[in-house]
Image (cartoon, rainbow, N blue to C red):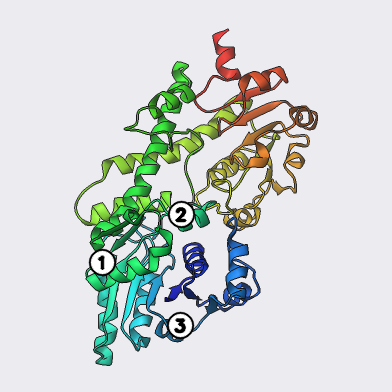
Protein backbone atom coordinates (compact mmCIF):
# COMPACT_ATOMS: atom_id res chain seq x y z
CA UNK A 1 0.00 0.00 0.00
CA UNK A 2 0.94 3.65 -0.45
CA UNK A 3 0.77 5.43 2.91
CA UNK A 4 1.28 9.05 3.91
CA UNK A 5 2.08 9.97 7.52
CA UNK A 6 1.75 13.64 8.48
CA UNK A 7 3.97 14.48 11.43
CA UNK A 8 7.46 13.07 11.91
CA UNK A 9 7.64 13.21 15.67
CA UNK A 10 7.54 10.22 17.98
CA UNK A 11 4.25 8.67 16.84
CA UNK A 12 4.49 9.61 13.18
CA UNK A 13 8.08 8.48 12.69
CA UNK A 14 7.60 5.14 14.45
CA UNK A 15 4.38 4.53 12.52
CA UNK A 16 5.95 5.37 9.17
CA UNK A 17 9.10 3.34 9.74
CA UNK A 18 7.27 0.24 10.94
CA UNK A 19 4.79 0.39 8.08
CA UNK A 20 7.72 0.60 5.65
CA UNK A 21 9.48 -2.27 7.40
CA UNK A 22 6.67 -4.68 6.42
CA UNK A 23 6.68 -3.58 2.78
CA UNK A 24 4.34 -0.60 2.51
CA UNK A 25 5.65 2.48 0.71
CA UNK A 26 5.54 5.35 3.16
CA UNK A 27 6.06 9.08 2.84
CA UNK A 28 6.46 11.03 6.06
CA UNK A 29 5.44 14.67 5.84
CA UNK A 30 6.47 17.49 8.14
CA UNK A 31 6.33 21.27 7.77
CA UNK A 32 9.69 21.62 9.52
CA UNK A 33 12.16 21.75 6.63
CA UNK A 34 15.22 21.28 8.87
CA UNK A 35 13.71 18.16 10.43
CA UNK A 36 13.07 16.72 6.95
CA UNK A 37 16.64 17.53 5.87
CA UNK A 38 17.98 15.86 9.02
CA UNK A 39 15.88 12.76 8.41
CA UNK A 40 17.22 12.54 4.86
CA UNK A 41 20.70 12.58 6.44
CA UNK A 42 19.78 9.93 9.01
CA UNK A 43 19.57 12.40 11.92
CA UNK A 44 16.52 11.62 14.04
CA UNK A 45 14.56 14.15 16.14
CA UNK A 46 14.08 11.65 18.97
CA UNK A 47 15.93 8.84 20.69
CA UNK A 48 14.22 5.46 20.49
CA UNK A 49 16.16 2.16 20.60
CA UNK A 50 16.34 0.55 17.16
CA UNK A 51 14.66 3.40 15.30
CA UNK A 52 17.73 4.88 13.60
CA UNK A 53 18.71 1.54 12.10
CA UNK A 54 15.20 0.97 10.68
CA UNK A 55 15.04 4.49 9.23
CA UNK A 56 18.33 4.03 7.37
CA UNK A 57 17.41 0.56 6.10
CA UNK A 58 14.02 1.54 4.73
CA UNK A 59 15.34 4.72 3.13
CA UNK A 60 18.05 2.67 1.41
CA UNK A 61 15.42 0.17 0.21
CA UNK A 62 13.27 3.04 -1.10
CA UNK A 63 10.28 2.19 1.01
CA UNK A 64 10.53 5.30 3.23
CA UNK A 65 10.58 8.91 2.05
CA UNK A 66 10.50 12.33 3.71
CA UNK A 67 9.04 15.56 2.37
CA UNK A 68 7.39 18.87 3.24
CA UNK A 69 4.98 18.51 0.29
CA UNK A 70 1.72 17.25 1.79
CA UNK A 71 -0.32 17.61 -1.40
CA UNK A 72 1.94 15.40 -3.51
CA UNK A 73 2.42 12.81 -0.77
CA UNK A 74 -1.30 12.55 0.05
CA UNK A 75 -2.40 12.26 -3.56
CA UNK A 76 0.05 9.42 -4.15
CA UNK A 77 -1.38 7.47 -1.20
CA UNK A 78 -4.30 5.22 -0.32
CA UNK A 79 -4.41 6.44 3.27
CA UNK A 80 -3.16 9.46 5.20
CA UNK A 81 -2.30 9.27 8.89
CA UNK A 82 -2.57 12.43 10.97
CA UNK A 83 0.12 12.01 13.62
CA UNK A 84 0.84 15.54 14.79
CA UNK A 85 1.05 16.76 18.37
CA UNK A 86 -1.91 17.49 20.63
CA UNK A 87 -0.19 19.53 23.36
CA UNK A 88 -1.88 20.34 26.62
CA UNK A 89 -3.69 23.66 26.52
CA UNK A 90 -3.64 26.17 29.35
CA UNK A 91 -6.81 24.69 30.84
CA UNK A 92 -5.50 21.10 30.60
CA UNK A 93 -7.53 20.10 27.54
CA UNK A 94 -5.94 18.80 24.34
CA UNK A 95 -5.03 21.47 21.78
CA UNK A 96 -6.37 20.25 18.43
CA UNK A 97 -5.15 23.10 16.24
CA UNK A 98 -2.46 20.99 14.54
CA UNK A 99 -4.77 18.04 13.90
CA UNK A 100 -7.47 20.26 12.41
CA UNK A 101 -4.87 22.25 10.48
CA UNK A 102 -3.68 19.09 8.75
CA UNK A 103 -7.29 18.08 8.05
CA UNK A 104 -7.92 21.43 6.34
CA UNK A 105 -4.77 21.04 4.23
CA UNK A 106 -5.82 17.54 3.16
CA UNK A 107 -9.26 18.87 2.24
CA UNK A 108 -7.72 21.69 0.19
CA UNK A 109 -5.29 19.54 -1.76
CA UNK A 110 -6.91 16.08 -2.10
CA UNK A 111 -7.39 15.01 -5.71
CA UNK A 112 -8.54 11.45 -5.01
CA UNK A 113 -10.69 9.56 -2.50
CA UNK A 114 -8.71 8.95 0.68
CA UNK A 115 -8.93 7.30 4.06
CA UNK A 116 -7.89 9.94 6.60
CA UNK A 117 -6.74 8.28 9.81
CA UNK A 118 -6.42 10.13 13.10
CA UNK A 119 -3.38 8.58 14.82
CA UNK A 120 -2.78 11.42 17.26
CA UNK A 121 -4.09 11.04 20.80
CA UNK A 122 -7.30 13.06 20.72
CA UNK A 123 -10.43 13.55 22.83
CA UNK A 124 -13.62 11.73 21.99
CA UNK A 125 -15.45 13.50 19.16
CA UNK A 126 -12.31 14.65 17.34
CA UNK A 127 -13.01 12.48 14.30
CA UNK A 128 -16.28 14.40 13.90
CA UNK A 129 -14.33 17.68 13.91
CA UNK A 130 -11.85 16.32 11.37
CA UNK A 131 -14.73 15.18 9.18
CA UNK A 132 -16.30 18.65 9.39
CA UNK A 133 -13.00 20.31 8.47
CA UNK A 134 -12.53 18.03 5.47
CA UNK A 135 -16.10 18.53 4.23
CA UNK A 136 -15.87 22.31 4.64
CA UNK A 137 -12.83 22.41 2.36
CA UNK A 138 -14.41 20.08 -0.18
CA UNK A 139 -17.59 22.16 -0.20
CA UNK A 140 -15.57 25.33 -0.77
CA UNK A 141 -13.96 23.61 -3.76
CA UNK A 142 -17.33 22.19 -4.93
CA UNK A 143 -15.67 18.77 -4.94
CA UNK A 144 -17.45 15.40 -4.86
CA UNK A 145 -14.43 13.53 -3.48
CA UNK A 146 -14.97 11.14 -0.59
CA UNK A 147 -12.58 11.64 2.32
CA UNK A 148 -13.38 8.99 4.92
CA UNK A 149 -12.29 9.60 8.51
CA UNK A 150 -11.15 6.80 10.82
CA UNK A 151 -9.62 6.56 14.29
CA UNK A 152 -6.52 4.47 14.98
CA UNK A 153 -4.90 5.43 18.29
CA UNK A 154 -1.32 4.42 19.08
CA UNK A 155 -0.31 2.29 22.05
CA UNK A 156 3.44 2.78 22.00
CA UNK A 157 5.67 2.78 25.06
CA UNK A 158 8.73 4.99 24.84
CA UNK A 159 11.80 2.80 24.92
CA UNK A 160 10.02 -0.22 23.37
CA UNK A 161 8.03 1.49 20.59
CA UNK A 162 9.41 -0.60 17.72
CA UNK A 163 8.47 -3.90 19.38
CA UNK A 164 5.11 -2.47 20.42
CA UNK A 165 4.28 -1.59 16.82
CA UNK A 166 5.76 -4.67 15.15
CA UNK A 167 4.34 -7.10 17.72
CA UNK A 168 1.16 -5.40 18.95
CA UNK A 169 -0.98 -6.74 21.76
CA UNK A 170 -3.93 -5.01 20.09
CA UNK A 171 -4.72 -2.65 17.22
CA UNK A 172 -7.77 -0.47 17.77
CA UNK A 173 -9.57 1.22 14.87
CA UNK A 174 -12.78 3.19 14.69
CA UNK A 175 -14.59 3.17 11.35
CA UNK A 176 -17.96 3.97 9.82
CA UNK A 177 -17.76 1.91 6.63
CA UNK A 178 -16.99 -1.62 5.52
CA UNK A 179 -14.57 -0.24 2.93
CA UNK A 180 -12.50 1.47 5.61
CA UNK A 181 -12.50 -1.69 7.71
CA UNK A 182 -11.19 -3.76 4.80
CA UNK A 183 -8.45 -1.25 4.08
CA UNK A 184 -7.31 -1.46 7.70
CA UNK A 185 -7.32 -5.26 7.57
CA UNK A 186 -5.07 -5.15 4.50
CA UNK A 187 -2.79 -2.51 5.98
CA UNK A 188 -2.26 -4.30 9.31
CA UNK A 189 -2.29 -7.88 8.03
CA UNK A 190 1.53 -8.29 8.32
CA UNK A 191 1.38 -7.36 12.01
CA UNK A 192 -1.32 -9.82 13.07
CA UNK A 193 -0.70 -12.95 11.03
CA UNK A 194 -0.30 -14.91 14.27
CA UNK A 195 -3.61 -13.66 15.66
CA UNK A 196 -6.06 -11.68 13.48
CA UNK A 197 -8.18 -11.22 16.61
CA UNK A 198 -5.73 -8.53 17.76
CA UNK A 199 -7.47 -6.11 15.40
CA UNK A 200 -10.41 -4.52 17.22
CA UNK A 201 -12.96 -2.82 14.97
CA UNK A 202 -15.31 -0.38 16.68
CA UNK A 203 -16.96 3.03 16.35
CA UNK A 204 -15.05 6.34 16.37
CA UNK A 205 -16.06 7.38 19.86
CA UNK A 206 -15.09 4.08 21.47
CA UNK A 207 -11.77 4.02 19.64
CA UNK A 208 -10.88 7.56 20.72
CA UNK A 209 -11.86 6.90 24.30
CA UNK A 210 -10.04 3.55 24.47
CA UNK A 211 -6.69 5.30 24.17
CA UNK A 212 -7.42 7.77 26.97
CA UNK A 213 -8.99 5.06 29.11
CA UNK A 214 -5.91 2.82 28.81
CA UNK A 215 -3.47 5.56 29.80
CA UNK A 216 -5.69 6.80 32.60
CA UNK A 217 -6.00 3.28 34.03
CA UNK A 218 -2.21 2.82 34.05
CA UNK A 219 -1.73 6.23 35.65
CA UNK A 220 -4.32 5.26 38.27
CA UNK A 221 -2.43 2.09 39.17
CA UNK A 222 0.81 4.03 39.57
CA UNK A 223 -0.78 6.70 41.75
CA UNK A 224 -2.55 4.10 43.87
CA UNK A 225 0.69 2.26 44.57
CA UNK A 226 2.42 5.55 45.38
CA UNK A 227 -0.30 6.32 47.91
CA UNK A 228 0.17 2.86 49.37
CA UNK A 229 3.92 3.46 49.57
CA UNK A 230 3.37 6.60 51.64
CA UNK A 231 1.19 4.64 54.03
CA UNK A 232 3.85 1.90 54.17
CA UNK A 233 6.43 4.47 55.26
CA UNK A 234 4.18 5.48 58.14
CA UNK A 235 3.10 2.06 59.40
CA UNK A 236 6.30 0.13 58.64
CA UNK A 237 4.97 -2.15 55.90
CA UNK A 238 6.89 -3.14 52.76
CA UNK A 239 5.41 -2.02 49.43
CA UNK A 240 7.33 -4.78 47.60
CA UNK A 241 5.60 -7.47 49.63
CA UNK A 242 2.25 -5.78 49.03
CA UNK A 243 2.96 -5.55 45.30
CA UNK A 244 3.72 -9.27 45.09
CA UNK A 245 0.66 -10.19 47.11
CA UNK A 246 -1.63 -7.99 45.04
CA UNK A 247 -0.10 -9.01 41.72
CA UNK A 248 -0.70 -12.69 42.40
CA UNK A 249 -4.43 -11.99 42.05
CA UNK A 250 -5.17 -12.59 38.33
CA UNK A 251 -7.89 -9.95 38.49
CA UNK A 252 -5.19 -7.37 39.27
CA UNK A 253 -2.06 -8.70 37.55
CA UNK A 254 1.58 -7.89 38.17
CA UNK A 255 2.23 -4.90 35.93
CA UNK A 256 2.30 -1.22 36.89
CA UNK A 257 2.35 -1.96 40.61
CA UNK A 258 5.70 -0.32 41.36
CA UNK A 259 6.01 2.70 43.60
CA UNK A 260 8.38 5.53 42.78
CA UNK A 261 8.68 9.31 42.40
CA UNK A 262 5.53 9.69 40.28
CA UNK A 263 4.74 9.26 36.60
CA UNK A 264 5.78 11.65 33.83
CA UNK A 265 6.31 11.73 30.09
CA UNK A 266 4.32 12.95 27.14
CA UNK A 267 1.25 10.75 27.67
CA UNK A 268 0.04 10.03 31.20
CA UNK A 269 -0.01 13.58 32.64
CA UNK A 270 -1.44 15.12 29.47
CA UNK A 271 -3.98 12.38 28.80
CA UNK A 272 -5.30 12.27 32.37
CA UNK A 273 -5.86 16.02 32.29
CA UNK A 274 -7.44 15.88 28.84
CA UNK A 275 -9.85 13.16 29.97
CA UNK A 276 -10.79 15.22 33.05
CA UNK A 277 -11.51 18.20 30.79
CA UNK A 278 -13.52 16.02 28.40
CA UNK A 279 -15.68 14.97 31.33
CA UNK A 280 -16.18 18.58 32.38
CA UNK A 281 -17.24 19.59 28.86
CA UNK A 282 -19.86 16.86 28.95
CA UNK A 283 -21.09 17.80 32.42
CA UNK A 284 -19.53 14.96 34.40
CA UNK A 285 -16.73 15.22 36.94
CA UNK A 286 -14.20 12.37 36.84
CA UNK A 287 -13.41 12.28 40.56
CA UNK A 288 -11.04 9.31 40.46
CA UNK A 289 -8.85 10.85 37.76
CA UNK A 290 -8.76 14.20 39.54
CA UNK A 291 -7.37 12.35 42.57
CA UNK A 292 -4.89 10.45 40.38
CA UNK A 293 -3.43 13.69 39.04
CA UNK A 294 -3.26 15.26 42.49
CA UNK A 295 -1.61 12.18 44.00
CA UNK A 296 1.02 12.15 41.28
CA UNK A 297 2.05 15.72 42.04
CA UNK A 298 2.09 14.97 45.77
CA UNK A 299 4.44 12.03 45.21
CA UNK A 300 7.07 14.17 43.48
CA UNK A 301 7.13 16.55 46.45
CA UNK A 302 6.94 13.67 48.93
CA UNK A 303 10.16 12.08 47.69
CA UNK A 304 11.89 15.46 47.65
CA UNK A 305 10.85 15.94 51.27
CA UNK A 306 12.69 12.72 52.17
CA UNK A 307 15.91 14.37 51.04
CA UNK A 308 15.16 17.65 52.77
CA UNK A 309 14.12 16.00 56.04
CA UNK A 310 17.35 13.99 56.18
CA UNK A 311 19.57 17.04 55.95
CA UNK A 312 17.29 19.56 57.62
CA UNK A 313 19.02 22.36 55.75
CA UNK A 314 20.03 21.82 52.12
CA UNK A 315 21.96 25.06 51.80
CA UNK A 316 25.48 24.29 50.62
CA UNK A 317 24.77 20.58 50.12
CA UNK A 318 25.73 18.93 46.85
CA UNK A 319 23.29 16.33 45.54
CA UNK A 320 24.11 13.84 42.79
CA UNK A 321 21.21 12.94 40.50
CA UNK A 322 21.13 9.75 38.47
CA UNK A 323 18.45 9.95 35.79
CA UNK A 324 16.59 12.90 34.25
CA UNK A 325 14.34 11.25 31.63
CA UNK A 326 10.92 10.21 32.89
CA UNK A 327 11.80 6.56 32.23
CA UNK A 328 14.78 4.56 30.90
CA UNK A 329 15.11 4.00 27.16
CA UNK A 330 14.04 7.50 26.15
CA UNK A 331 15.30 11.08 26.09
CA UNK A 332 11.82 12.40 26.97
CA UNK A 333 11.83 14.63 30.06
CA UNK A 334 8.34 16.08 29.74
CA UNK A 335 6.66 16.16 33.17
CA UNK A 336 9.56 14.06 34.49
CA UNK A 337 9.76 13.77 38.30
CA UNK A 338 13.38 14.90 38.01
CA UNK A 339 12.19 18.39 37.04
CA UNK A 340 10.29 18.90 40.30
CA UNK A 341 13.00 17.30 42.44
CA UNK A 342 15.89 19.25 40.88
CA UNK A 343 14.02 22.54 41.01
CA UNK A 344 13.10 22.01 44.67
CA UNK A 345 16.69 21.12 45.54
CA UNK A 346 18.00 24.28 43.86
CA UNK A 347 15.28 26.42 45.45
CA UNK A 348 16.32 25.12 48.86
CA UNK A 349 19.96 26.05 48.36
CA UNK A 350 21.50 22.79 47.17
CA UNK A 351 24.00 22.34 44.35
CA UNK A 352 23.03 19.58 41.89
CA UNK A 353 25.24 17.45 39.63
CA UNK A 354 23.07 15.49 37.20
CA UNK A 355 23.67 12.60 34.83
CA UNK A 356 21.45 10.88 32.28
CA UNK A 357 22.54 8.68 29.34
CA UNK A 358 20.14 10.33 26.87
CA UNK A 359 17.97 12.99 28.49
CA UNK A 360 20.43 15.78 29.34
CA UNK A 361 19.94 17.96 26.19
CA UNK A 362 16.16 17.92 26.55
CA UNK A 363 16.39 18.54 30.31
CA UNK A 364 18.57 21.60 29.69
CA UNK A 365 15.98 22.90 27.26
CA UNK A 366 13.08 22.12 29.61
CA UNK A 367 14.38 23.78 32.80
CA UNK A 368 16.53 26.49 31.27
CA UNK A 369 19.53 27.97 33.06
CA UNK A 370 19.29 26.95 36.72
CA UNK A 371 22.02 28.39 38.89
CA UNK A 372 23.57 25.59 40.89
CA UNK A 373 22.76 22.83 38.37
CA UNK A 374 25.59 21.19 36.44
CA UNK A 375 25.59 18.23 34.05
CA UNK A 376 28.31 15.58 34.03
CA UNK A 377 29.56 13.07 31.49
CA UNK A 378 29.48 9.91 33.63
CA UNK A 379 27.40 8.67 36.52
CA UNK A 380 30.41 8.54 38.81
CA UNK A 381 31.36 12.13 37.95
CA UNK A 382 28.12 13.22 39.62
CA UNK A 383 29.23 11.64 42.91
CA UNK A 384 32.41 13.64 43.37
CA UNK A 385 32.21 15.38 46.77
CA UNK A 386 28.41 15.01 46.80
CA UNK A 387 26.51 14.73 50.08
CA UNK A 388 24.01 12.24 48.66
CA UNK A 389 23.10 10.21 45.60
CA UNK A 390 19.48 10.35 44.42
CA UNK A 391 18.38 7.69 41.91
CA UNK A 392 15.41 9.01 39.92
CA UNK A 393 15.44 7.03 36.63
CA UNK A 394 16.31 3.33 36.65
CA UNK A 395 18.62 3.21 33.63
CA UNK A 396 20.41 -0.18 33.30
CA UNK A 397 23.83 1.38 33.92
CA UNK A 398 22.68 2.42 37.40
CA UNK A 399 21.50 -1.03 38.45
CA UNK A 400 24.77 -2.46 39.82
CA UNK A 401 27.05 0.39 40.93
CA UNK A 402 30.46 -0.16 42.46
CA UNK A 403 29.49 0.94 45.95
CA UNK A 404 33.06 1.04 47.24
CA UNK A 405 33.99 3.43 44.44
CA UNK A 406 30.82 5.44 45.06
CA UNK A 407 31.62 5.77 48.76
CA UNK A 408 35.11 7.01 48.00
CA UNK A 409 33.72 9.71 45.70
CA UNK A 410 30.87 10.86 47.94
CA UNK A 411 31.45 13.31 50.77
CA UNK A 412 28.85 11.52 52.88
CA UNK A 413 27.58 7.99 52.22
CA UNK A 414 23.87 8.66 51.65
CA UNK A 415 21.62 7.12 48.99
CA UNK A 416 18.01 7.99 48.18
CA UNK A 417 16.67 5.19 45.99
CA UNK A 418 13.44 6.52 44.50
CA UNK A 419 12.97 3.39 42.37
CA UNK A 420 13.47 0.79 45.13
CA UNK A 421 16.27 -0.71 43.08
CA UNK A 422 18.91 -1.35 45.74
CA UNK A 423 19.11 -3.49 48.88
CA UNK A 424 19.00 -2.05 52.40
CA UNK A 425 21.23 -4.85 53.72
CA UNK A 426 23.79 -4.39 50.94
CA UNK A 427 23.98 -0.63 51.43
CA UNK A 428 24.13 -0.91 55.21
CA UNK A 429 27.03 -3.36 54.94
CA UNK A 430 28.86 -0.81 52.83
CA UNK A 431 28.22 1.86 55.47
CA UNK A 432 25.58 3.87 53.61
CA UNK A 433 22.53 5.62 54.99
CA UNK A 434 19.81 4.32 52.63
CA UNK A 435 16.27 5.57 52.05
CA UNK A 436 13.71 4.32 49.54
CA UNK A 437 9.95 4.55 48.88
CA UNK A 438 7.55 2.47 50.95
CA UNK A 439 10.10 -0.13 52.09
CA UNK A 440 12.15 -0.62 55.26
CA UNK A 441 15.28 1.53 55.11
CA UNK A 442 17.92 3.08 57.35
CA UNK A 443 15.49 5.70 58.61
CA UNK A 444 12.75 3.22 59.57
CA UNK A 445 15.33 0.86 61.11
CA UNK A 446 16.75 3.72 63.17
CA UNK A 447 13.28 4.72 64.36
CA UNK A 448 12.69 1.18 65.65
CA UNK A 449 15.78 1.20 67.83
Mark 1 sits on what residue?
175
Within 10 angstroms of label 3, few (less than 14), some, or many (20 or more) residues? many
Residue positioned most to the left: 283
Q: Please state the horizontal and vertical placement of residue 312, each as a whole percent of the image.
A: 61, 26
Within 10 angstroms of label 2, few (less than 14), some, or many (20 or more) residues? few
- Tell which of 317 and 63 is nearer to you: 63
- The residue located at (61%, 53%) in the rendering is 363
- Tell which of 344 and 356 is nearer to you: 356
What distance separates the C-alpha of mark 3 from that of mark 2? 27 Å
The image quadrant that residue 226 belongs to is top left
Identify whether 65 is placed above or below 369: below
First in sequence, mark 3 or 2: give its number.
3
Identify whether 427 is placed above or below 121: above
Within 10 angstroms of label 1, few (less than 14), some, or many (20 or more) residues? many
Mark 3 sits on what residue?
73
Is residue 329 something one can see in this rendering? Answer: yes
Amino acid sequence: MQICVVGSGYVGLVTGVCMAEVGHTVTCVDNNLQKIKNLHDGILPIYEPGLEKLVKRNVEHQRLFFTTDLATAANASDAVFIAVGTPQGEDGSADLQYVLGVAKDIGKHAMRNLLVIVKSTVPVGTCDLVDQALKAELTARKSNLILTVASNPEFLKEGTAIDDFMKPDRIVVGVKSKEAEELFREMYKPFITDDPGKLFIMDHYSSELTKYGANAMLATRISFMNEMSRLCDIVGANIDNIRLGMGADPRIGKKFLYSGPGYGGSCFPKDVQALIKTGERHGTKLEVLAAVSKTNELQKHYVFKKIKDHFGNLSGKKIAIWGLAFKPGTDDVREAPAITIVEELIKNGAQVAAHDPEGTPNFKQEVGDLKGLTYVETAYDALKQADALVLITEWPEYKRPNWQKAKELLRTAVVFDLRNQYSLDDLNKEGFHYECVGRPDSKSRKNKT
